[in-house]
Image (cartoon, grey):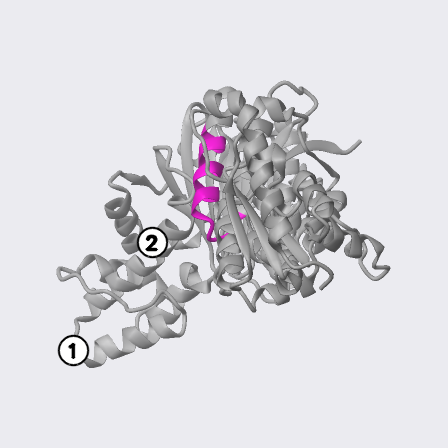
Amino acid sequence: MATRVAQLSCGTEYSGMQWILNDIADQVGIELVYPEMELSQVESACDEIGFRAESPGLNMMMARAVSMLKDPSIKGALLLTCFRCAEGTVVKDVIRRFLHERTDIPVIAYSNVEKPKEIELYARLEALKTLITRKALLMRERQEGTTLGVDSGSSTTKVVVMKENDIVGEAWLPTTDPIRSADEAIEKALAAAGMKEQEIESIGVTGHGRELVGEHVKADLNLEEVSVVAKGAALLTGRHKGEASVIDIGGMNNKLILMRDGIANSFSLGGICGGSSGRFLEVAAHRLDVGISELGQLALKSHERHELQSYCMVFGIQSLVVSLAAGVKREDVAAAACRSVAEQVYETQIQEMEMRPPVIFVGGVSLIEGVKKEFEQLLGTDVIVPQNSQYAGAVGIATLVSGL
Amino acid sequence: MKVLVYPPNSLILADLVERGGHEPVVLMREIGKHVRDAEIDAPPLNVTEEDLKRALRYVSVEEPAGVKGRIGLLAPLLEQAEASIILTDAPPTFGCMGCAVSDEFFKFLIRKRNIPTLEVRYEGGERMKETVDRIMAFLAGLPKGK
């Protein structure tokens, strides 16, 4: 039976994307429903939420948000307003806060554009479906037995071997052919753990290559990244209760996840611009003639603030080169590159959602100290980078698979 | 004359225009074309790519998708209108496009066409008769049989 998710929007049919939404919802087993409401209830709903918009469509959207609370068959909410609509963005945020106050159901948001990328919508709806249907599994707070977690990412493949809640072996390799990279990383992780494949009780797979790799390794569990990374971040920091925010920046993508009691309940995915990914920093490190692992340390030596003129992978790097040619110190340029990534994530994702302290930073880029420092300055709060932060996905899936 | 009404889906205004001896230009006809077009898969759930492209003649590419979609649907009405009646401050149940930006922008586009236009404020209750009288007087003043 399809999972019922409320579509709260102000006229998606006018954006030309409703058919894509319906199509993808169908593929992931979600039934999009419009919560029932009477026009006469719009006024009282606005009063209840405490906000009134100029656009009648947005007021109706709020009325549907109030109405959905009365329907127990609705298990999630998808908020949609147009990209670049200021009033819509405010209403989306107001509704998200309202729903988070009144209910525990997961809420995700997306901005309507004329030609949405299907893969982006698919990733969001799939993650929403996992958060709804796998809630019992996601409540797991401890890894048991001996399990292996594979995170087949877009730029690196991470593998951990876990035994009774401890990481006993790990490996991290660039992803080339996803299957070959996974095989090599598994072999290395098992060698590091001093174990044989036969000793592994179950295998979990996540990441971009999870379908292909999951089939190859005969995975017992195959889950999308949002719920898994959130779980991994909760496990690595030991924060299973209360609220937290997780920033995950990988080689080619990034996520912001808000979680409650160790389970994601709202998230935003990057994917518009490569300038806010690890790849940007790799190119910057290459231009600064340092290894990517040294870039963060170099940035920490900076004493003079310098700005790159663009977040773009091309024009930002061009600005970096021009800065070096103009005599700006390498450490100041390295710090500017780290700030560029942090600022873009802040402007495109954190600002759009909200920040629930504590802030946990995971993914490969979390190892670059300069980016952590820039996030702390931007957010005005400490950022936690747990040990093995780059393995958050692998740890999350290794733990979840032990609960099957 | 072809008289465009705003809100463009107002059945009451459309009826008044017909009673006044003119042809109402309303959104329902445009949607109807989409419904009857065999090449559109799921009418009238979606605006088509053509509607969105058509909107670019009037709105900047930076406008939100929903504004483009609405203006794209309304553009043919604008292009055929020879006169217009704009009812302002009408409640949503009277007919509306749901989006305040589209609403304001489309009214601006109507005004820019320099066609005979009546702008009248919605008055509920007893004063509605005065509003209807003004509309009928405006319609009576328009040349017939064009």
User: Label 2: few (<14), some or many (≥20) within 10 Å?
Assistant: many
Q: In the current view of this chain or complex, which residue is farthest to the bottom?
A: A325
Name the residue tied to disc 2.
A342
Relative horizontal placement of residue A375, taking residue A155 as reference (left or right):
left
User: Label 1: few (<14), some or many (≥20) within 10 Å?
Assistant: few
User: Residues in magenta?
Assistant: A82-97
Residue type beneath disc 1: Gly
Under circle 2, the secondary element is helix
* Residue A378 x %, y %: 27, 47
Q: Quadrant of residue A290?
A: bottom left
Relative horizontal placement of residue B81, taking residue B34 as reference (left or right):
left
Q: Is residue A209 visible?
A: no
* Residue A361 x %, y %: 38, 44
Q: Is residue B87 visible?
A: yes
Q: Are marks 2 and 1 on the same chain?
A: yes
Q: Residue at x 28, y 69 (%)?
A: A309
Q: How many marks?
A: 2
* Of A258 and A114, the residue lying toward us: A114
Q: Residue at x 37, y 37 (%)?
A: A355
* Of B87 and A335, the residue lying toward us: B87
Q: Tell me the quarter of the image containing the C terminus of chain A.
A: top right
